[in-house]
Image (tube, rainbow, N blue to C red):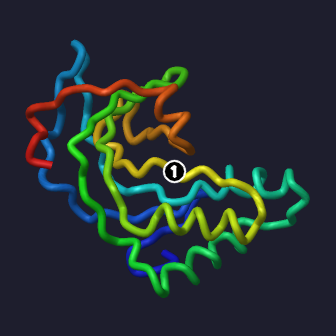
């Protein structure tokens, strides 16, 4: 844990969510039964993808430096509040498939704007989402940019989750 609410693990910084509103243990979508994830989080920074983007332009940043940038930003901007948008997506990449709920998070875009200015490279803002269900137990699919979200997902209707 790098803050009381955020974790830095396996190349990502994420907002950990203790309990996500009593979701059904499984749902059926497109003829498939989807088990609920055992933990929920919002990935905020995919450090393992940001570092090479920055360094390909002559930088020498490390994951630890980006984690410190996050901590510095978090001191003045609360990155614990989010709002579900009501947009659900079926994400498929190679053999993995997930169902995610898109969320908005005030301050997240400004973090990437600040990092882009600091390192002199345009960094994509990660689409804020929560992986709710996955065909492969507890396997998520990282969505690094809006382009990846559009390429690898399709909108779906989930009336049984309209309470989100």
Q: Is residue 138 left or right of residue 82?
A: right
Q: Is residue 108 left or right of residue 16?
A: right
Residue at (68% x, 50% y) in the render: 49
Q: Residue furthest bottom?
A: 75
The secondary structure type at the circle numbered 1 is: loop
Q: Is residue 64 left or right of residue 31?
A: right
In the depicted view, which residue is nearer to us: 145 or 25?
Answer: 145
> Where, by quadrant of the figure, is residue 116 drawn?
bottom right
Rendering coords of residue 121 (x, y %): 75, 57
Question: Image height check: is 159 above or below 5?
Answer: above
Residue at (86% x, 63% y) in the render: 59
Residue at (86% x, 54% y) in the render: 57
Q: Residue furthest right?
A: 58
Rendering coords of residue 107 (x, y %): 43, 69
Rendering coords of residue 32 (x, y %): 25, 17
Task: State how many labels appear.
Answer: 1
The residue singled out by tag 1 in the image is: 126
> Where, by quadrant of the figure, is residue 27 drawn?
top left
Rendering coords of residue 140 (x, y %): 45, 40
Q: Residues within 10 Å of mark 1 (few under 14, many from 20)?
A: many
Q: Is residue 157 left or right of residue 132?
A: left
> Where, by quadrant of the figure, is residue 148 drawn?
top right
């Amino acid at each position: 844990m790098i803050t009381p609410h955020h974790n830095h693990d396996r190349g990502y910084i994420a907002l950990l969510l203790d309990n996500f509103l009593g979701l059904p243990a499984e749902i059926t979508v497109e003829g498939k039964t989807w088990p609920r994830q055992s933990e929920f989080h919002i990935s905020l920074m995919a450090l393992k993808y940001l570092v090479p983007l920055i360094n390909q332009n002559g930088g020498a940043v490390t994951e630890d430096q980006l984690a410190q940038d996050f901590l510095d930003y978090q001191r003045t901007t609360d990155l614990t509040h989010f709002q579900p948008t009501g947009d659900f997506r079926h994400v498929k990449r190679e053999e993995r498939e997930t169902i995610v709920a898109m969320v908005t998070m005030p301050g997240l875009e400004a973090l990437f704007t600040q990092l882009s200015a600091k390192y002199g490279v345009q960094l994509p803002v990660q689409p804020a989402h929560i992986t709710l269900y996955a065909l492969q137990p507890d396997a998520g699919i990282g969505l690094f940019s809006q382009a990846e979200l559009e390429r690898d997902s399709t909108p779906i209707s989930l009336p049984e989750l309209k309470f989100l």
